[in-house]
Amino acid sequence: MATYCPKCNYKLRLRDYKPECPQCGINLVYYGMEERLRAEADKAEHEFALSAPKVDRIKSSTIGSTFTKVRLGLYFLPILAMLVPMGAYSLTLPFYEKATTLNLVSIVQLVGSFDFGALMAMIKSELFGTEFLMIAISLISLLLVLVLALVETGLLVLSCSPKGLVRNFTLNFICIALVITSAITYNLAATRLSAAFPSIATASINWWGPFAILACFLVLVGTNIIQKTKGIEVKYRDVSEFLMPYDERPSVIAAKAEKEAAIKLAEELKEQTERELEVKIAAARAVDAVEDALEL
């Protein structure tokens, strides 16, 4: 509850429980509400004006032109390319046999059900610890490629920001390096395991898989090069008016001037109408006076 009346500065007491001021009678709840609403709207419009350039850059980075729309679709290609078989392995033991083709789905399922404790024990093995370490590096690298590809697609909306292109190039080259690391380490591990245990474990790499992923990332590098050379036009909206105080905005001043002009014109028309009416009344009275004189 207010301590003083906002209009007459009357000090309110506990017994003044009514919404009206006992001194001047104004409603304490609704007094000045229009000004408060205008101030809140002015603040909201000012915040909108500050964020509008960022929104314009996001729009231009994704759907601002045909090039950006096509590029947005291309950024999903590396993830789709990871569905291509990248390798295979088989394990033959007494009463157990398993053969698996490696792609994004099987790798995610494998990692989800993997016994990491057993993996650490196999990495520490003196016989084939190096090979399993390579396999672990290969899987981790491939999963990082998936994560970074998703992150890169999400950050595509910031391509027109000051550091957008640097970020895109950096993530592309990191993913390319991880794909190469994953392919090389898996191929070395597969070759060594197949040579050491030819009748138990066989593994091979399908080079089409890594090449397809690399090709997709190279396409993305090419789109960033095109943006670097030709640029993307950012269509900024003119929101400079909303950065000004409400009473100083051109549209508000113009609307106020138009309203004042309309009021002035209405007053002039009213005065003119009143004068015309007075003239008509005077003329009618003169006619009546002449008719009265003729009758006499």
Image (tube, rainbow, N blue to C red):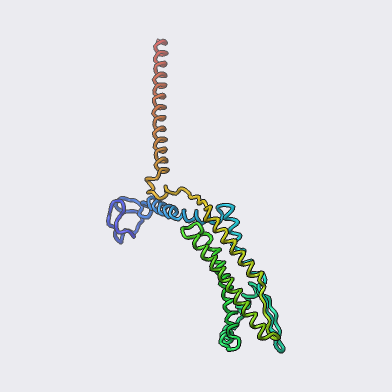
Please say if 212 is above or below 280. below
Q: Is residue 270 left or right of residue 88?
A: left
Q: Quadrant of the C terminus?
A: top left
Choose top left, top right, bottom left or bottom right for residue 141: bottom right
Residue at (60% x, 56% y) in the render: 70
Rendered view: 67 above or below 274: below
* Quadrant assignment for the N terminus: bottom left
Indicate the position of residue 171 as horizontal and vertical percent values: 53, 66
Q: Nearer the viewer, residue 287 or 140?
A: 140
**Residue closest to the eye, 124 or 277:** 124
Tell me the quarter of the picture where residue 251 sits: top left
The one nearer the camera, 286 or 77, is 77
Q: Position of residue 257 (x, y in %)?
A: 39, 38
> Viewed as shown, does residue 9 lie left or right of 42?
left
Q: Is residue 67 above or below residue 204?
A: above
Q: Residue at x 62, y 80 (%)?
A: 189
Q: Residue at x 58, y 89 (%)?
A: 126
Q: Position of residue 136 (x, y in %)?
A: 58, 79
Q: Position of residue 194 (x, y in %)?
A: 67, 82
